[in-house]
């Protein structure tokens, strides 16, 4: 079972049961994971810039932290889906 990089409408995890890594749904999940990882790299860079700016206000810091938490949630889901010890696959 593969933990997919999105949740259902009820917020619960979604899983894919297939032995075909080239299936349309597998490819969609791979593409979304790649986009999430790329976005996380950008968020880390931008959040670092905000934290390095002594003039950054509370709004900027809160926004950067909010985006960092969103990205970390995505990255953790990807890590869990790829770790055979997690039981997610």
Image (cartoon, grey):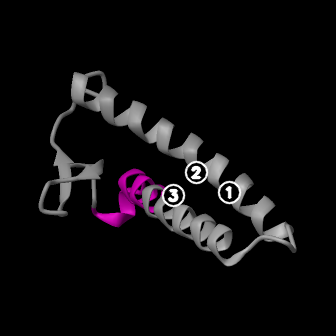
Looking at the rendered structure, the number of numbered marks drawn on it comes to 3
Find out whether the residues at labels 2 and 1 contact each other: C-beta distance under 8 Å: yes
* Foreground residue among 54 and 27: 54
Q: Position of residue 87 (x, y in %)?
A: 28, 63
Q: Residue 40 carries which label?
A: 2
Q: Which residue is drawn at 51% across and 58% down?
A: 71
Give the SS element for disc 1: helix
Whichever of labels 3 and 2 marks the residue nearer the N terminus, that label is 2
Q: How far apart are marks 3 and 2 (CA)?
A: 5 Å
- Report how far apart the C-alphas of labels 1 and 3 lie in the structure: 9 Å
Secondary structure mainly formed by the magenta segment: helix
Q: Which of 21 and 38 is in front in this view?
A: 38
**Is the Cβ of the residue at disc 1 closer than 8 Å to that at disc 3?**
yes
Q: In this view, does 47 lie to the left or right of 23?
A: right
> Which residue, given by chain and number where applicable, does mark 3 sit on?
71
Q: What stretch is highlighted in magenta?
A: 75-87
Which picture quadrant has residue 59?
bottom right
The 10 Å Cα crowd at callout 2, few under 14, some 14 to 19, many 20 or more, is many
Residue 44: assigned label: 1
Image point 38% across, 64% down: which residue?
Answer: 85
Q: Is mark 2 on a helix, strand or loop?
A: helix
- Tell me if label 3 and label 2 are in contact, CB under 8 Å: yes
For this view, does 44 lie left or right of residue 88? right
Q: Is residue 4 visible?
A: no
User: Which type of secondary structure does the marked residue at label 3 adopt?
Assistant: helix
């Amino acid at each position: 079972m593969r933990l997919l990089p999105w949740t259902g409408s009820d917020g619960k995890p979604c899983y894919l049961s297939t032995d075909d890594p080239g299936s349309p749904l597998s490819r969609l999940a791979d593409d979304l994971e790649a986009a999430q990882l790329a976005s996380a790299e950008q968020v880390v860079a931008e959040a670092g810039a905000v934290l390095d700016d002594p003039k950054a206000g509370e709004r900027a810091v809160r926004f950067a932290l909010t985006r960092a938490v969103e990205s970390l949630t995505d990255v953790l889901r990807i890590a869990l889906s790829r770790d055979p010890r997690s039981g997610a696959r």
